[in-house]
Image (spheres, rainbow, N blue to C red):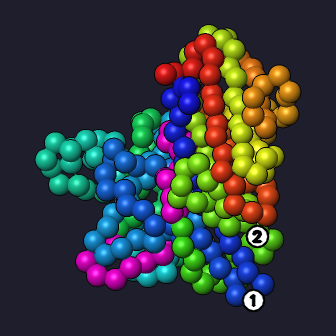
Amino acid sequence: MNGKIRQKAVALILSALIVMTSAVVAFAASGPESATAPGDGWVKIQAGESHWYTFRDEGDNGQIFVEMDVEGSAGFAVYTPAQVAAWQNGQDLDSIGIGNSNNNVSADLLWTGNFNQSGDYYVVVSQGASGTSDYQLRIHGADVWFPMPAAEMTTAVTPARDSAMSTDSSSTPASTDPNALLPGAEAVVSFDYDGKAGQILVSLDSDPDDAVTFSVWTPNEWQMRSLGQDAEPIGRGSANRFVAGDLSWSGNFVESGTYYLIVKNGSAQNANYTVTISGDGVSQ
């Protein structure tokens, strides 16, 4: 495969006809170097674990909201870049705030605040020395965006905590195999591009044929999507008899950065896929 490709499986919500279910994500992120954006699914945290998340704020005093729904005893704390840097230099890790219950919001735990300095801020979800918890984390604000994609995830199933989960989502979670998708599942593939208008070619081949589709997202579109704003991809894979594979897309850009593909299995059966990204300006 050409290009620097990173694949992130995206956890999706499950539903059933009789008992509502939700996706539970099981992973461990134990420091700022492994911090990611929060995903869409429910996350399982084991005794003694800490899960690190990061978000970017422009430091213009815009209000930031960190909300968490939790089944269990897990909590979260918020850290500034300076606090994390001091901790990495051997000092105690002191937070700027923690999640607390608030009767004015629907979430179990809430922290809200603002900053006057731009930078990468951190939210750390922690479980005590015993027990396990399931949680769902949301970070949002007018100028909040995510410098890292959502965590690489594996999934299990647990009963939903209430009826607030979507009732029209029948997708199943992504396989842990980076080149395989369960029915309805999605994966994210990203690549770096130098923005010098060199032509990019993306081709996708799937088994069964035509089971998997993909869309192409620029850095700006991906940021809007991460913030929950309305955003459309810059392009989608389509059949082209002159290019190997089921689907392909070709184009170029004058903006450097990380570009993304959303790969989806739209069929009713398991599917394998291969993505090839090539062209001038695509990082090797």
Q: Position of residue 8 (x, y in %)?
A: 55, 48
Amino acid found under the numbered disc labelled 1? Ile
Residue in front for this viewpoint, 242 or 195: 242
Q: Quadrant of residue 188?
A: top right
Residue named by callout 2: 170
Q: Nearer the viewer, residue 97 or 186?
A: 186
Q: Is residue 279 left or right of residue 232?
A: left
SS under mark 1 = loop
Seen at 27% across and 47% down, the residue is 83
Q: Is residue 148 magenta?
A: yes
Which residue type carries mark 2?
Ser
Q: In the picture shown, does residue 241 fall above or below 156?
A: above
Report the Cα–Cα distance between label 2 and label 1. Answer: 13 Å
The N terminus sits in image quarter: top right
Q: Residue at x 54, y 26 (%)?
A: 3
Q: Residues within 10 Å of mark 1 (few under 14, many from 20)?
A: few
* Spot occupied by residue 251 in the image (x, y as percentages of width and height): 75, 20
Q: Nearer the viewer, residue 129 or 265?
A: 265
Q: How many numbered badges does the structure rendering display? A: 2
Local packing at callout 2 (Cα closer than 10 Å; few below 14, some 14-19, many 20+) is: some
Does the magenta portion include 140? yes
Q: Residue at x 63, y 64 (%)?
A: 173
* Numbered mark located on residue 180 in the image: none
Where's residue 216, x and y in %?
72, 35
Q: Is residue 192 visible?
A: no
78 relative to 105 in the view: left or right: left
Instruction: Point out the tag, 2 or 1, that comes first from the N-terminus.
Output: 1
**Magenta residues, as a range?**
127-154
Q: Secondary structure at mark 2?
A: loop
| Residue indicated by mark 1 | 18
Q: Is residue 169 visible?
A: yes
Q: What residue sits 79% from the left and 58% below the top? A: 267
